Image (spheres, rainbow, N blue to C red):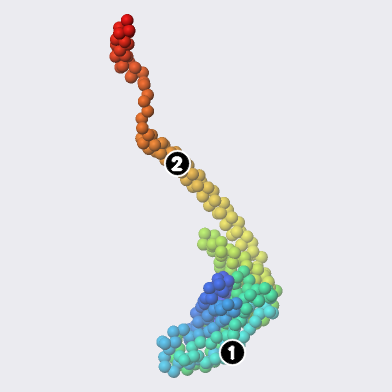
Amino acid sequence: MGKQVDNTFTWVIKNVSTMQAHKSSRYKQFVVGGCKWRLIASTEFNDLSVSLEVPIRESLPSGWRRHAKITLTLVNQLSQKFSRQQETQQWFDQNNPRFSFPPILDLKVFADKYGGFLVNDGIMIVAAVDVLEVIGSLDEPEKSQSMDVKGFQVLPSQVKSVNCLFERHPDIASKFSIKNKSLKTAYMNVLLSLSETLHQSPKEISKDDLSDAKTTLAYMKNVGFKVDWLENKLDELFKKEKEAGVIRMQKIEEEFKDLKQKCSSLEALLKKEKADVLAARTPSSFFVTDDDLIMWLPLLMLCIMIILVDLF
């Protein structure tokens, strides 16, 4: 999942253990300063590293350059004060399209020793890119400038949603104490995504979505958001999922019962066919029936008479 407001891009990377096991990379793209940027997360052994690059450098016009200030924050999802931050300024051009930060997380050490960075096999990264100097033409149109709503910087398209949140739940951020602008933006984006997810139709929400929502909801409560109304909504969705699961189970049981009956009938038919085949292969035994006796009785009587005449 990735969300952007103004110059800040928030990325929640899921299933980090899968990345670690396969030494893989993932990326997300966004636009800042009229330029496409790509944020890349990769693993090598236990280290998680993040890089920022200008994608498709071959297509950049001659003389294209960007001077940018980059702030990378690894968010502690249980306690913001323990979040880790790196900051640098770099020039990007065709010859130097990429900057790699030093490894930001030792997955094994931090998973064992420190809590909050790797939660539910996921991490949260916030990248803020301030373009300080532009040389050459712009590649992409600028994103709409952010607007302030109740102390949170949001896009114009998000203003209505954020205002609705505060109208319906005036005290939603009464205990939210984080001051960092980028982190405030990141958490508001996550809260909007969470609210949007939980208000979808139950048929559109998977079990994984509900599990992720439960974990994310815990993050929101931990940083001070009052989200009891979302907890109630989540409980309702879990209840509906359970009811739907019971219905699915009953349907499967009925289908299984029918299948067992069909298998039983086929098994009986198979036994009969085997018996018929074996009977056809067995040599006939000599059996004297009543019809046989009636047919051979006159001849038998004649033979007995002849024998008796000879004897006397």
Between residue 45 and residue 92, name the one nearer to us. Answer: 45
| Residue 16 image offset from top left, x and y in percent | 57, 72
| Residue 94 image offset from top left, x and y in percent | 45, 90
Quick check: 62 left or right of 89?
A: left
**Which residue is farthest top?**
312
Of circles 1 and 2, which is in front? 2
Quick check: 185 left or right of 175?
A: left
Q: Earlier in the sequence, mark 1 or mark 2?
A: 1
The answer to which image quadrant residue 299 occupies is: top left
Type of amino acid at the residue the image marks with label 1: Thr
Label ID, residue 88: 1
Between residue 275 and residue 2, name the one nearer to us. Answer: 275
At 46% from the left edge and 43% from the top edge, which residue is drawn?
263
At 57% from the left edge and 57% from the top edge, which residue is drawn?
241
Label ID, residue 267: 2
Type of amino acid at the residue the image marks with label 2: Glu
| Residue 144 image offset from top left, x and y in percent | 51, 82
Which type of secondary structure does the marked residue at label 2 adopt?
helix
